[in-house]
């Protein structure tokens, strides 16, 4: 149970503000996260780590000497947006390039990769390392698809120590990859965690049972078993990890990690057996960590991480570090470096993506279309608010339960940005682009990145002066532009924009129809829309019919096993539950159909 909060929806930001205040000698707030309070030596590669909140001391607690230079802080269990990653990385960079590192989750991979592209465009050499230590999340022949859990810490520690020791960027990257290649984790969960403001945990386990092969985002284990005695659990953990650990070394680093509410004493009892099993296996354990390094809110559980150390990794593992949430050895001066100037201790919001931009002047039709986009987004916001809990519930079945919250905050961000565009007389293209940028920035996560990219791509595809002329969406437009009462150009323009959106989603997520994602609603929608239009159906009615198809295909994803995304390791559990991203998309398409119908036919018809 998470008992202490003010506004549950701002829990992550409120926690970050308190953390920054309490650790002002170590860290400064920047938009999107935290950086070291003192600027490291010029030319040092910056190690920027990150992910969702709920994992303390990961990630912000690891900002300090010998560890990270910056941490990007997302909402609870939600990847930070690419804007946030870019913002923190820019603030942390001191001329030696940037290493970005996070766990290997779809949302983090998308957002960190997009930020890296922007940093490189700015001339900042940027490398990416995604951690894949969790042996339970994919078989060995698909090791690249594994997720990052407590092994995140190993990779961050090694990269941070390497950068502190004077390695140049590509050497820091090499060391971080080496650490990832030689790190394996396996864990168990005894009880699920509860999001702030919620009454029920994201998953529950019967008394005396445990989830085997845990995730760190409230995902349940991949299977269930009886809770054994500590000595027996030690054997299970050691067996699972050793089976996959490179066997060419006899020295290992170890982390026995608590997930949030397993007591330190319990961990020490367990460690007693783990340690003797490792010794019996002929391994020498180097400076083990027994405690909480990568948590999952108040989840009860633990995991064992082993690192097959070569000489270089051992030196980097042993190197001193001094961060708010992790201290090791002794460093000459706490927080060495010059004080950072002009930074606030408090977190500052990311600037609204389109707020300050001026919009190009466009035709009256395009301005009207922008107003319709705003009306559509507002209707979507109301519908998503109503569906927030249910979307969270179906996301929690095999994912992390954040989909409802993410969609709600994304669409609210989009509404605010588009309202500004409309106020400034902007058109359809500017409205959709602003909606996309703001959605991605405020929501974060996988769906935030994908909705953001899709809306932006749709907007970029619509030429304000040519296509929008034809894309009449109000009764007035229909009368003006198409004397026969039908806005004939609207459907082809909309179809092309939708196809551009699908291409953007595919480019970013590499998913296909049938993988159990939002594409299982979007692609059937566009296909149905196109064929309805080809049959001569008026386009708003065609949209409505296609939205009904999307609702059906979204529900039909219940029969599918997820092949991508956070739910993939728990594919069996997901059977019988529809994909949350497909359900929310179908909901939005249906709501927009209604807005378009009212817009074209007037509120009183049908
Ligand atoms: P996260 O998985 O980061 O918690 P959300 O819960 O907000 O993100 O969104 C999950 C949804 O994102 C899934 O239900 C699915 O529809 C969609 N999704 C996940 N991965 C992909 C992908 N590779 N391509 C397209 N859609 C995806
Ligand atoms: Mg989710």
Image: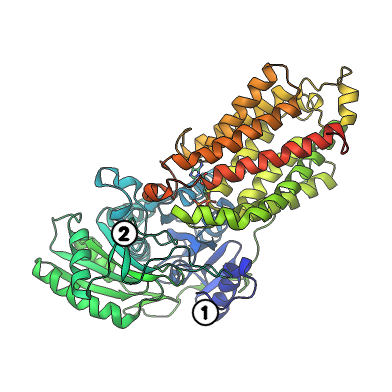
Q: Is residue 541 above or below residue 178?
A: above
Residue 588 as seen in the image, left or right of residue 325: right
Pointer 1: what residue?
A: 25
Pointer 2: what residue?
A: 213
Label 1: element kind:
loop
Q: Is residue 453 visible?
A: yes
Name the residue rendered at 29%, 43% in the picture: 142
Q: Is residue 347 above or below residue 580?
A: below
User: In which quarter of the view is residue 169 placed?
Assistant: bottom left
Q: Residue 337: percent from the left, percent from the top?
A: 47, 73
Sequence-first tag of 1 and 2: 1
State yes or no: Cβ of the residue under disc 2 lies below 8 Å from any atom of ligand 1.
no
State yes or no: Cβ of the residue under disc 1 lies below 8 Å from any atom of ligand 1.
no
Q: CA distance from mark 1 to mark 2?
A: 38 Å
User: In which quarter of the view is residue 315 placed?
Assistant: bottom left
| Label 1 CA crowd tier, 10 Å (few <14, some 14–19, many 20+) | some
Q: Nearer the viewer, residue 167 or 585?
A: 585
Residue 264 as seen in the image, left or right of residue 479: left
Name the residue rendered at 88%, 37% in the picture: 604
Q: Is residue 97 visible?
A: no
Q: Residue 30: percent from the left, percent from the top?
A: 59, 65
């Amino acid at each position: 149970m998470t008992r202490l909060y003010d506004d549950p929806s701002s829990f992550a930001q409120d926690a970050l503000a308190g953390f920054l205040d309490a650790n002002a000698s170590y860290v400064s707030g920047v938009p999107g996260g935290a950086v070291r309070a003192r600027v490291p030596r010029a030319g040092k590669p910056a190690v920027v780590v990150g992910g969702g909140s709920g994992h303390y001391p990961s990630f912000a607690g690891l900002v300090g000497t010998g560890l990270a230079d910056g941490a990007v802080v997302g909402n609870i269990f939600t990847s930070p947006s690419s804007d946030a990653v870019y913002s923190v990385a820019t603030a942390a960079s001191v001329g030696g390039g940037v290493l970005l590192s996070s766990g290997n989750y779809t949302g983090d991979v998308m957002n960190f990769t997009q930020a890296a592209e922007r940093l490189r465009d700015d001339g900042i050499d940027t490398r990416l390392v995604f951690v894949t230590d969790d042996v339970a999340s994919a078989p060995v022949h698909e090791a690249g698809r594994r997720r990052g859990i407590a092994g995140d810490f190993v990779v961050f520690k090694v990269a941070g120590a390497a950068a502190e020791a004077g390695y140049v960027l590509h050497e820091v990257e090499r060391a971080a990859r080496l650490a990832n290649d030689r790190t394996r984790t396996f864990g168990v969960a005894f009880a699920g965690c509860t999001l702030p403001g919620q009454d029920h945990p994201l998953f529950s386990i019967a008394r005396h049972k445990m989830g085997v092969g845990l995730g760190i985002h409230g995902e349940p284990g991949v299977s269930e078993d009886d809770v054994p005695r500590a000595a027996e659990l030690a054997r299970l953990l050691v067996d699972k990890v050793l089976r996959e650990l490179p066997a060419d070394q006899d020295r290992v680093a170890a982390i026995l990690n608590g997930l949030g509410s397993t007591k330190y004493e319990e961990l020490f009892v367990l460690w007693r057996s783990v340690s003797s099993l490792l010794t019996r296996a002929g391994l020498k354990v180097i400076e083990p960590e027994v405690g909480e390094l990568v948590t999952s809110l108040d989840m009860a559980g633990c995991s064992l991480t082993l690192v097959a150390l070569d000489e270089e990794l051992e030196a980097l593992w042993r190197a001193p570090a001094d961060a708010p949430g992790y201290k090791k050895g002794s460093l000459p001066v706490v927080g060495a470096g010059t004080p950072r100037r002009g930074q606030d201790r408090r977190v500052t919001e990311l600037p609204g993506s389109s707020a300050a931009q001026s919009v190009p002047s466009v035709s009256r039709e395009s301005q009207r279309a922008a107003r319709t986009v705003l009306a559509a987004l507002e209707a979507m916001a109301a519908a998503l608010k109503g569906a927030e809990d249910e979307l969270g519930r179906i996301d929690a079945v095999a994912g992390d339960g954040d989909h409802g919250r993410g969609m709600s905050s994304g669409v609210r961000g989009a509404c605010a940005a588009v309202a500004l565009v409309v106020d400034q007389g902007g058109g359809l293209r500017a409205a959709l682009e602003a909606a996309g940028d703001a959605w991605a920035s405020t929501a974060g996560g996988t769906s935030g990145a994908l909705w953001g990219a899709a809306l932006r791509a749709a907007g970029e595809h619509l030429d304000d002066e040519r296509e929008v002329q034809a894309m009449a969406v109000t009764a007035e437009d229909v009368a003006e532009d198409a004397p026969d009462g039908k806005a004939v150009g609207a459907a082809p323009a909309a179809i092309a924009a939708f196809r551009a959106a699908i291409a953007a989603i595919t480019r970013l997520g590499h998913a296909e129809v049938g993988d159990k994602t939002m594409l299982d609603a979007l692609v059937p929608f566009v296909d149905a829309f196109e064929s309805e239009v080809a049959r001569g159906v008026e386009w708003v009615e065609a949209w409505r019919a296609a939205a009904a198809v999307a609702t059906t295909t979204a529900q039909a994803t219940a029969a599918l096993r997820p092949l991508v995304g956070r739910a993939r390791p728990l594919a069996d559990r997901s059977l019988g539950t529809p994909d949350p991203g497909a359900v929310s998309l179908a909901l939005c398409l249906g709501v927009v159909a209604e807005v378009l119908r009212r817009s074209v036919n007037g509120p009183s018809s049908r």
